[in-house]
Amino acid sequence: MTETAMSTAKSSKLNGFDLKTAGPAIALLILCVIGFLLNPAFLSEGNITNLLTRSAFIGIIAVGATFVITAGGIDLSVGSMAAVIAGVMIIVMNGAVDTFGTGLTTVLIGCGCSIILGLGAGLVNGLLTTKGKIEAFIVTLGTMGIYRSLVTYFADGGTLSLNYDIRGVYRPVYYESFLGLPIPVWVFIIVSIAGWFLMNRTAFGRYCTAIGSNESVAKYSAIKVDRVKTLTYVIQGLCVSLATIIYVPRLGSASSSTGVLWELEAIAAVIIGGTVLKGGYGRIGGTILGALILTTIGNILNFTDMISNYLNGTMQGLIIIIAVWLQRGDWGRKTSAD
Amino acid sequence: MKTFRKIGALATVATIAFTGWASAENIKIGVSYPTPTHAWAAGMNWHAEKAEERLEALYPDVDLILVNSPDPSAQASALEDLMSVHQIDALVVLPFESEPLTDPVLNVKKSGALITVVDRGLSQPGIEDIYVAGNNPELGRVSAQYMKGRLKEGDNIVILRGIPTLIDNERFDAFMAEIEGSGINVLDHKHANWNRDDGFEVMQDFLSRFPDIDAVWAQDDDIAIGVVAALKQAGRDGNGMFVVGGAGMKETIKGIMDGNELVPVDVLYPPAMIATAMDVTVAAFKSNGPVAGRYILGATLITPENAASFYFPDSPF
């Protein structure tokens, strides 16, 4: 981490130390030091594994959100989408037990169903935004309400629970490890690498940035703006479905309280990571750090009783604002820069 | 055992003769409550519908009108409709929030209807004729008593609390008052928002932070499910470890009937209280005994012996 900080510092001598890139990493490092000072058990293997696994849900969703936001859009529906996909997955898997038994086939059917739903839900958001010419905020605010009430309806207001025998087969997807890292963390790593590659090494990534900076210019530059924008929502949907696939085996249930506020956490992770909310500049690496920072805050607050429980939200809010201020503020720089 | 115990009657309304309401040809009773958005409320919705079927079959002249509303202002409008369109003789209301619904309920009262308030009190005293509620402090106290019976001096527990609200404070304060002086250490308490995911994460962190935990008070059955998953993940579900939840979720009660050692008991905070309120309200028109007053339901400790009477396999909760 320090190496990256050093190299960026060299590459941007004009600004002295480039906080735009190093900001999130520094914030995370400071948080970890605070956590360790509060309780050395913070750095125990068990806690670090818990932290990383927990970050995987928001992290994976936030990777998708980075594309949407970079291209100048926003998706408020991801939390509700995760809840409804989790709900439908559970219904489908419970229903498939009679035909396919409680083996791997049923779990694969559930996962396949999740991916189809994710892609479909993303496509709906994307098409309504581009072809329907409705603002993304309104489209996804609408689908957010629709998905949330659908899961409540499917669960009859209660909780959908996965068949107990399938749970045994599916459980390892959340709880087992591979080469010392839990499987959700591996999924997170793979999604992050794929996202980074797509954003930084492909034409698609550059198109997203171009559209986010100036949609008209992008259109005149022969970029298929509608198609690229729609694709960002489809990617977001895919990310949500992957996150759901690793979420369901954790507790084997979905209810109307599943995924509440995930959309805001994902957006916060993206912005903390240095992506600009109005689009035109996106950083996948920063997003991942942002997701880790958000989870770490919650974790540290559980590790201490120095701060009143009622002030948890205050601490989270302060740290988010400071983390963003670290990279946006003009402090330490000559003010003439615009 | 009685399902509820009456702890006091409102002297001011005791003199009112309820026979006045009963003279109408058809007795219309409005039942207003929040739209179910979580499992407990869905259970309440189910029990309200069951009570409606049962009471209307029993008394053909009683008409119960069930309305659920998604937010406080919708509930206020629903109350106006019940009054103007249906011209109800009595209202059973589980208010979304106390403050914004106090005036609307007061308006219904001015129309002459009998008022039964369920679970959450109004912010002005003396409006309701009948009050039916679960007993939050008792839930905390009964849980603490069970802990004291199972644990010895020097044992450690952690507490997972609900959403920061008055209900949560009442439960927590009564628990702490009861546990005080027993020598049982409360290592820490955190809010898990009556939610499985938060229960899981908070418990994971408690397990990393405290190497020695003997029992967990999860206060709520949803939180307890998350706690149990975290305990199993960490392999710390043995050695006499146990978790006490609360509410009376059907899966939890089934587990108790089957002799689950990790969650051996539950403390009742029943969604069926709406049915109790409807029964009492109908009784105001049908019974020859006085019914006005405050009914505080017991926070019964559910054990393998009595679990069957609290088990409703068809309810969503």
Image (cartoon, rainbow, N blue to C red):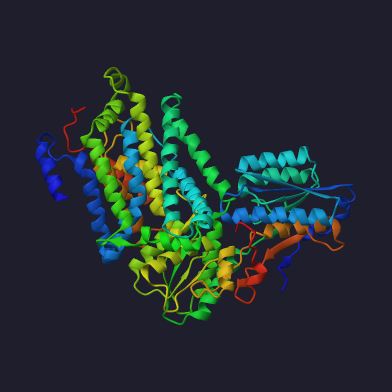
Q: Position of residue B67 (x, y in %)?
A: 69, 45
Q: Is residue A319 left or right of residue A92?
A: left
Residue at the limit of the structure toward the bottom, as seen here: B152
Of residues A310 and A145, the one drawn nearer to the viewer in this rendering: A145
For the point 36% across and 75% down, the residue is: B212
Residue at the limit of the structure toward the front, as seen here: A99
- Quadrant of the rendered structure where residue A307 is? bottom left
Of residues B81 and A166, the one drawn nearer to the viewer in this rendering: A166
Q: Position of residue A331 (x, y in %)?
A: 21, 37
Q: Count how many numbered circles sit on residues in the image.
A: 0
Of residues A299 and B255, the one drawn nearer to the viewer in this rendering: B255
Q: Is residue B31 left or right of residue A166?
A: right
Q: Is residue A19 left or right of residue B2?
A: left
Q: Position of residue B271 (x, y in %)?
A: 64, 59
For the point 50% across and 35% down, the residue is: A142
Indicate whether A185 appears above or below A18.
below
Residue at the limit of the structure toward the top, as seen here: A220
Indicate whether B46 appears above or below B68.
below
Q: Position of residue A115 (x, y in %)?
A: 41, 44
Residue A310 can be seen, yes or no:
no
Residue A45 can be seen, yes or no:
yes
Q: Is residue B250 left or right of residue A27?
A: right
Indicate whether A139 appears above or below B51.
above
- Quadrant of the rendered structure where residue B315 is? bottom right
Quadrant in which the N terminus of chain B is drawn: bottom right
Quadrant in which the C terminus of chain B is drawn: bottom right
